[in-house]
């Protein structure tokens, strides 16, 4: 059997994998990246990127329809929306591959399995095997979805992958589960004219977000014509003889049935840790996720786990920065990225960007806090963009003025939140936000106004004037 | 004659005026704001806001036309574009007035004139007069435009005000002067299908911007179908018998004539300092602009000048922060806004956001510097937005890694630049940009990648791969 020696072997080509591979190659290490499918992982193939392409087209479509100057009938060619998405994805995947190769990373197509703590055997597509020996391993094999109790059929009971490759816009769809992915899909389908029901088993959508943001987005979704059912647990999906789907919902008032053309079912993420030979190494897993320390290292020294497979959060940027940071840890060249301070991005219309503590989380602490807000209805830039729904909300420590959390529901919120991430990572507080000049008119001015609002000193907004 | 006493009297209701008035009222001072026309100044009535409304609609129109899924004929109703703009402006002006009144600012409609260093007389619309006595005065009377050598007729030879109130989209237009305003108007008219010629007397458009950004935008404008003439000085405009305009241009190759339906002429800003009674006070002016110290105070103690009228730059955010800072200076409650660190925003498609030194300015210094870049062609978020033209460029001190300048040509660049403004104001450098987590996919990641690129360590971009 062929044997090769590397400094680093990476299993999995998503952001947690390719980020580490590229960083290690930049640092002069010999790197091999093993991927059994297309490069890019869930993020590029089935997650962030495909959905963001679709959402952008849908947003453009709805913005035009809401524009007073729109004349003539604008029709959407659904097939072309899907095609554009595929083209963007293909070119981005090619981009990653080109960077990997030009940085000198060896790419192996196949499945990797540990033989020992310094050896992995890769079974290639053609059946041949290669043995890779390395000092360090990065496991970035991601997570898959467990769809129980549902049985997706790809036609009527859809997984998110199925939804991304639909040939035709359905007339109606039920989206089960109202986390980020759920509200994004709901928003997409509704914007194109589909009847959408969102079904959420807990008491509100986007349970991870600040309760105010969650309630505000719900109101916006309802105004778009989406039906939002909370406290409703979908326990079954049956296909009717007419080719529709009947969902059974358990609600506080009893059992409920709704009929739709298609149902998009959620999945519970499960770490891809099977068939990796981990038993042999004695690496511990929990719900199939790999347990790691703050350096993303597993219980076996030199073996790291980055991205979804470590179960610490399911964001591409978390995966990417973990991949980079792992290399910086073992090359002792730390970028000092704070991998715990993770911005949360939801690409609805308007978008959501948030970071740090929610108001509920702040209330659970001992220390006193204050809140500053600026409603987008008072933003001049939002008015020019014809997108005045939303709010910025900054939660700050009362004593020191440090930023505890920032919650933005606004156009471009997924970009605006980066400013908060920079501020919080570098310990800038409310005073520093106020001491900065922001372009006028911009949405970013909301940082200035929200920070001022903590002392009741906003310039373009007076509580009670605009819904705050 | 009626006499009133205030703590602060503000002359002029633009951002430099209302910003100071609101801030002073918040600080518990008795404030009177004198404005002879509509509240909001040039920014709201004839500058930032009206143009941003128009540009947004034009951008939406061109984005849709460039979308592969667009079917059917989308027509633009020019009159409605203008109407929407008017509605937005009216509601924003009303918003400012409401805040002023609710904060307890007295608004006087009329013209103010100094009688002494603590007295102003206001001639109201009805001819009656009021005498205002105050400890502090903020002169925020703005600037007007001198159109010589041209004579605008409102029909064919247009000022920017005329262009904002057109009833019909012209078939062709020449825009003279390629500063921010010029390229924005050119971009607007071209996006709606008008034939546009941009005429610039210096060697390149956007002379204030980094030369690379300027050249890149020029290429984009040319690709949109705009004709860009540089080194061409428009010295005359004659109306033809057919109702068109013939422009005479002086170029290095000699005299040139171009015929268009309409010409948009530039103006040279002149401070509005006449008829204010300033001679009486001995306040010095230069080219009609009021000279001020770093606290925006004129040569007479207690009399300040903010915004365009001090001639130190023509940005609404500069005016606004000066207005606020003036009050903080005399109430000794400084926000410490650095009013010299001014972000520059241009709302073309893609937008430009920049701050600090250009590459040419950095080259003139003694200290060594480095440049990091990230082309939008390598940005995944830009790909999903179908807007991959542009670049981010960070100029940094070689020794300390401090940020000297940031130049962004990209979608949402006017927002992205706020992050650079925050970083520079608070002395965060390249290491801090790298240590921050940005959402994936976002355009903001360009900060991470550009910062890494300084050391040749970008993750998603390899020099030579994508046009950098």
Image (cartoon, coloured by chain):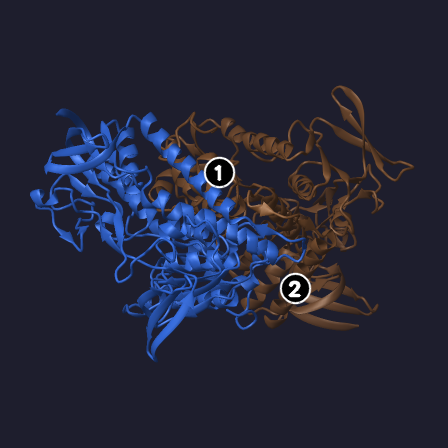
Chain colours: A blue, B brown
Which residue, as the protein is rendered here, is positioned at the far top? B253
- The subunit carrying tag 1 is B
Q: Position of residue A426 (x, y in %)?
A: 35, 49
Q: Tag 2: Cα neighbours inside 10 Å, few (<14), some, or many (≥20)?
A: few
Q: Tell me the SS state at disc 1.
A: strand
Q: Relative to residue A332, is residue B299 drawn left or right?
A: right
Which residue, as the protein is rendered here, is positioned at the far front? A241
Q: Relative to residue A52, is residue A385 drawn left or right?
A: right
Which image quarter is the N terminus of chain B in?
bottom right
Which residue, as the protein is rendered here, is positioned at the far bottom? A253
C-alpha distance separating marks 2 and 1: 34 Å
- The subunit carrying tag 2 is B
Q: Position of residue B84 (x, y in %)?
A: 68, 58
- Residue A358 lies in what quarter of the image? bottom left
User: Is any atom of residue B244 visible in this view?
Assistant: yes
Name the one closer to the observer, A390 or A76: A76
The residue beneath circle 1 is B406
The residue beneath circle 2 is B91
Name the one closer to the observer, A311 or A424: A311
């Amino acid at each position: 059997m062929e044997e090769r020696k590397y400094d680093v072997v990476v299993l999995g080509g998503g952001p947690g994998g390719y980020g580490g591979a590229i960083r290690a190659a930049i640092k002069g290490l010999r790197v091999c990246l093993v991927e059994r499918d297309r490069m890019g992982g869930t993020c590029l193939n089935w997650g962030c990127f495909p959905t963001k392409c679709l959402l952008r087209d849908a947003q453009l479509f709805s913005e035009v329809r809401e524009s007073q100057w729109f004349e003539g009938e604008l029709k959407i060619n659904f097939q072309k929306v899907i095609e554009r998405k595929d083209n963007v994805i293909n070119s981005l995947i090619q981009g990653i591959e080109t960077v990997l190769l030009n940085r000198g990373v060896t790419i192996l197509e196949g499945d990797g399995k540990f033989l020992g703590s310094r050896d992995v055997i890769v079974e290639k597509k053609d059946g041949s095997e290669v043995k890779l020996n390395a000092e360090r391993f990065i496991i970035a094999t991601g997570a898959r979805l467990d769809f129980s109790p549902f049985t997706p059929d790809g036609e009527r009971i859809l997984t998110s992958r199925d939804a991304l490759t639909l040939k035709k816009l359905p007339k109606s769809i039920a989206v089960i589960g109202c986390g980020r992915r759920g509200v994004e899909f709901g928003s997409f389908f509704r914007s194109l004219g589909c009847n959408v029901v969102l079904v959420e088993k807990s008491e509100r959508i986007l349970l991870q977000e600040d309760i105010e943001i969650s309630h505000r987005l719900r109101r916006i979704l309802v105004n778009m014509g989406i039906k939002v059912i909370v406290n409703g647990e979908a326990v079954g999906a049956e296909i009717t003889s007419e080719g529709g789907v009947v969902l059974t919902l358990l609600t506080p008032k009893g059992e409920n049935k709704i009929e739709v053309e298609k149902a998009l079912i959620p999945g519970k993420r499960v770490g891809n840790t099977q068939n990796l030979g981990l038993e042999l190494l004695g690496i511990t897993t929990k719900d199939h996720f790999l347990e790691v320390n703050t350096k993303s290292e597993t219980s076996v020294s030199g073996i790291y786990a980055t991205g979804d497979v470590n179960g610490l959060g399911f964001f591409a940027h978390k995966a990417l920065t973990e991949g980079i940071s792992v290399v910086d840890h073992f090359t002792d060249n730390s970028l000092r990225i704070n991998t715990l301070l993770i911005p949360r991005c939801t690409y609805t219309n308007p978008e959501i960007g948030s970071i740090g503590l929610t108001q509920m989380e702040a209330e659970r602490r001992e220390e006193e806090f204050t809140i500053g807000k600026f409603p987008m209805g008072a933003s001049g830039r939002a008015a020019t963009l014809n997108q005045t729904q939303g709010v910025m909300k900054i939660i700050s420590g009362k004593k020191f003025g440090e930023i505890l959390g920032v919650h933005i529901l606004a156009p471009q919120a997924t970009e605006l939140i980066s400013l908060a991430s920079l501020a919080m990572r570098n310990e800038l507080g409310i005073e520093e936000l106020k001491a900065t000049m922001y372009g006028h008119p911009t949405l970013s001015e909301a940082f200035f106004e929200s920070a001022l609002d903590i002392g009741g000193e906003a310039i373009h907004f007076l509580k009670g004037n605009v819904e705050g």
